[in-house]
Image: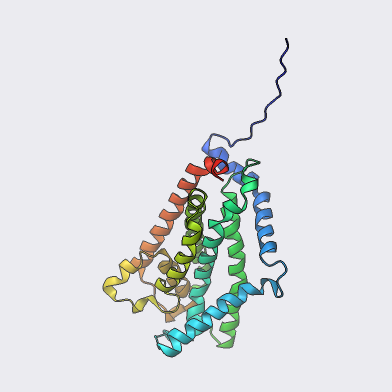
Amino acid sequence: MIQSTKPELVIEAGRAERQYWKDLWRYRELLYFLAWRDILVRYKQTAIGIAWALIRPFLTMLVFSVVFGALAKLPSGGVPYPILVYSAMLPWQFFANALSECSNSLIGNANLLSKVYFPRLIVPLSSVIVSFVDFLVAGMVLLGLMAWYNFVPSWRIVTLPLFIAIAFAASMGTGLWLAALNVKYRDFRYIVPFIVQFGTYISPVGFQSNIVPEKWRLLYSLNPMVGVIDGFRWAILGGNFSLYIPGFLLSLALVVLVLLTGIWYFRKVERTFADVI
């Protein structure tokens, strides 16, 4: 008796670590497709489209300017309070949006994960890129505020790309942790909104971090977004704002730690995603 066997096709990642990162580059078109798809879906059938990326931070800036500037009368360092707030609102909204998008990115692409091999890192990375597009669009409001108040930034503005890269790293690292954990523990979908809401008030978005007593500044900088936000203000506001170097270095070290451990943990559990989902 002759037994026929059907050929079996197995699709899996290369076992060598180098192969994975090569695959990440090879599948870059998939990254572009996922990011573009998410951008189109987010603003599909909305009356004003991508303008929502401008409206949300602008309205939040107005509220913070009234509460902290007009009512609480907190110091603004000699710059218009709306510019002070919005220069912090940009990196914070980028971070908050990235967390929200990343945490559900793997669940939202469950069908794709279970059918074909590609570096799973592409999925949360595409979510961060979508949030970065919103960040770039929202930056136009800051330009408008500067024009309105005749505010001219100093030479420090050339360092802004460095702080944008740090914000991207913080968003990516935290997003990888949440994306991986949310696959196994679905409770994280409820925790993320709390993290975003709570973080808004413990981060120096509506106020300057220098109002924190000196003895608590280093401890306060354990929030990685403190260094990111202070860096943005230092670059945008020029001589009107000083950078607390020890706190910034601590925040930077934490951002690097979160990014590296996020990549490590994501890669560790990546092979189980298709089974768990």
Question: Which picture quadrant has residue 19?
Answer: top right
Check the image and report above or below for 263 versus 149.
above
Whole-percent x and y of residue 219? Answer: 31, 66
Give the image's coloring scheme: rainbow
Question: Which residue is nearer to you in this view: 26 or 188?
Answer: 188
Whole-percent x and y of residue 220? Answer: 34, 69
Q: Is residue 108 found left or right of 237 in the rendered image?
A: right
Please count the marks in the image: 0
Check the image and report above or below for 155 versus 266.
below
Whole-percent x and y of residue 189? Answer: 51, 58
Q: Which residue is drawn at 35% across and 77% down?
A: 210
Inspect this view and state whether residue 95 appears.
Answer: yes
Q: Is residue 151 found left or right of 242 in the rendered image?
A: right
Check the image and report above or below for 1 versus 258.
above
Q: Residue at x 66, y 54 (%)?
A: 34
Question: Which picture quadrant has residue 23?
Answer: top right
* Residue lying furthest left: 215
Q: In which quarter of the image is the N terminus?
A: top right
Inspect this view and state whether residue 154 appears.
Answer: no
Q: Which residue is drawn at 59% across and 44% down?
A: 119
Check the image and report above or below for 175 versus 8.
below
